[in-house]
Image: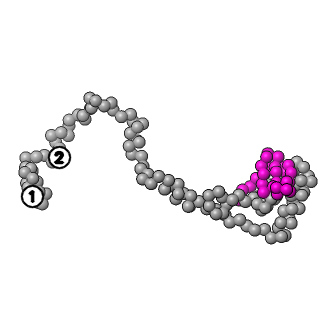
Amino acid sequence: MVDKLRWKMTGYDMDNTNLNYEDIINLPHPVSKRHKPMPVENRAAQFAPFAALTGHQAAIEEAARVTDVRMELDEEMKEQLNVKLQKSVSEPGQRIQIVYYVPDGRKSGGSYMTKTGIVKKIDEYQKILVLEDGSKIPLEDIREIE
């Protein structure tokens, strides 16, 4: 009832109109004479998500990324690692598996990585372990050797 009253106030005759669009429902779809139809591949771009805040999603993912805390070794564990390192150097060609800590460049903490290789040398001046593939691992970051 309110809708009819609104239409009458605008001067629109509701009784003589067809609200179901029966007068145009069966007409062919209009085709532009100026513009070519859009290719199907480009149509999906119209419905792509809109990221209003550039970099916001990356910041959320970075905040959600979990890092590990560096474990400190006691003297006994350090001694066991030294024995294993000396053994790997004295027996060339032996493959070892090393678990070591890599500090995170973006936030506090880091992660533990595992690397398998053959020890080339221990640089006591720089305090790094050098593997035959060229990898260099700081001795203070090594947590386990197998």
For the residues marked 1 and 2, what is the alpha-carbon distance in whole angstroms?
19 Å
Tag 1: Cα neighbours inside 10 Å, few (<14), some, or many (≥20)? few
Q: Give the residue at x 92% y 54%.
A: 90
Find residue 77 and report its image quarter.
bottom right
The label shown at residue 5 is 1
Q: Which mark is residue 20?
A: 2
Q: Could you tell which of marks 1 and 2 lies nearer the N-terminus? A: 1
Residue 100 picture location, percent across and down? 75, 58
Residue 30: % across, % down: 24, 34
- Pick the quarter of the image with the N terminus: bottom left
- Amino acid under disc 2: Asn
Residue type highlighted by circle 1: Leu
Q: Quadrant of residue 124?
A: bottom right
Q: Is residue 2 visible?
A: yes
Provide the major secondary structure of the magenta segment. Answer: strand
Q: Residue furthest top?
A: 33
Give the magenta range: 112-138
Point out the frontmost of discs 1 and 2. 1
